[in-house]
Image (cartoon, grey):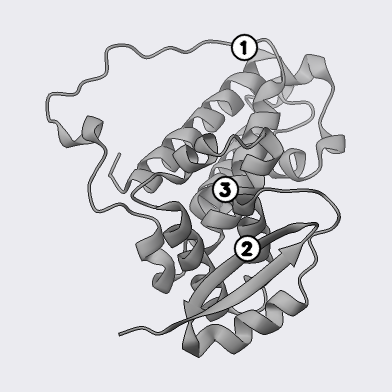
Amino acid sequence: MIVYQPVDVVCSGAAIKLHVPAGCHGLVSELASSFDAGAEAMSGLELHACFLEHCAPSNEAAAVAVLEAMCRKYGVPDTNIHVAIQQHGLDEGAAQRVLRAYYQLWNVQDAQRCYFAAEKPALLASDAARPMAIFGGHPGSTAYLAEARWLLDVYRPLIGDYVSRMAAFLSDLARDERLEPAYEEGLDVLRWLAHPSSEPEYEYLVSAPVSIPLVELTQLMHIMVLYKTLGVSP
């Protein structure tokens, strides 16, 4: 039987009480004493997430204990984390912080029980479910880069390696002598995502040879997040 002990985390007028295994209590308490999320007011769920991000680089076991405490508090993963965020009415910035923190331990074995519900979503549990339509098209804007940047920031442990491989493929493609005239500024996707100021001019980004493969990459990032978080195969 696991014995839990409480740890108080206080910041900017908000406070949460975490119940962590006794073996991690000292580590989590020490990290709580050094925690400072700044002066911004935040909800309990967001404070959980900020403290989790504080713990993750310092001690993996403590971070797993904090993640598990957060999941018990908010009924995750039986309640999907995205649903929990919606239920608490978090704004876009807060939602991004919570998701980024929650998925930070995706590749840690001891944290896996926090990510997959015991039952599959009803839509995927039925063999009768079939796609009715697939929509696509050329957006005529550069919003796809901001969208891809957001996805990579939040879900990096899930899709970071995939994006790196695809970016290398696209970069090599743009250097093909048969295609070089269409890619005067190359396809340096990773640099554009990491450093927005390095993005080429609007006219280059909305040109079909550039925007179509990058829009498709962004869509594939969405698909990869979906099937990984649902625990299904594409």
Relative horizontal placement of residue 171, taking residue 5 as reference (left or right): right
Residue 148, picture quadrant = top right
Three-letter residue code for mark 2: Ile
Q: Position of residue 119 (x, y in %)?
A: 22, 47
Task: Mark 1 or mark 3: name the one nearer the start of the chain.
Answer: 3
x and y percentages locating residue 109 in the rendered image: 40, 71
Quick check: 134 left or right of 31? left
- Residue annotated with mark 2: 16
Residue 186 point in image, percent of width and height: 73, 33
User: Alpha-carbon neighbours of circle 3 within 10 Å: few (<14), some, or many (≥20)?
Assistant: some
> Quadrant of the image for the N terminus?
bottom left
Marks 2/1: CA distance? 43 Å
Residue 92, given in percent of the width and then of the height, sits at 67, 34
According to the picture, the residue beneath numbered tag 3 turns out to be 99
> Label 1's element?
loop
User: For mark 1, what is the residue?
Assistant: 139
Q: Nearer the viewer, residue 139 or 14?
A: 14
Q: Nearer the viewer, mark 2 or mark 1?
A: 2
Label 1, label 3: how far apart the Cα atoms are? 27 Å
* Extreme residue in the left direction: 127
Q: Nearer the viewer, residue 122 or 190?
A: 122
Q: Quadrant of residue 143?
A: top right
Q: Amino acid at mark 1?
A: Pro
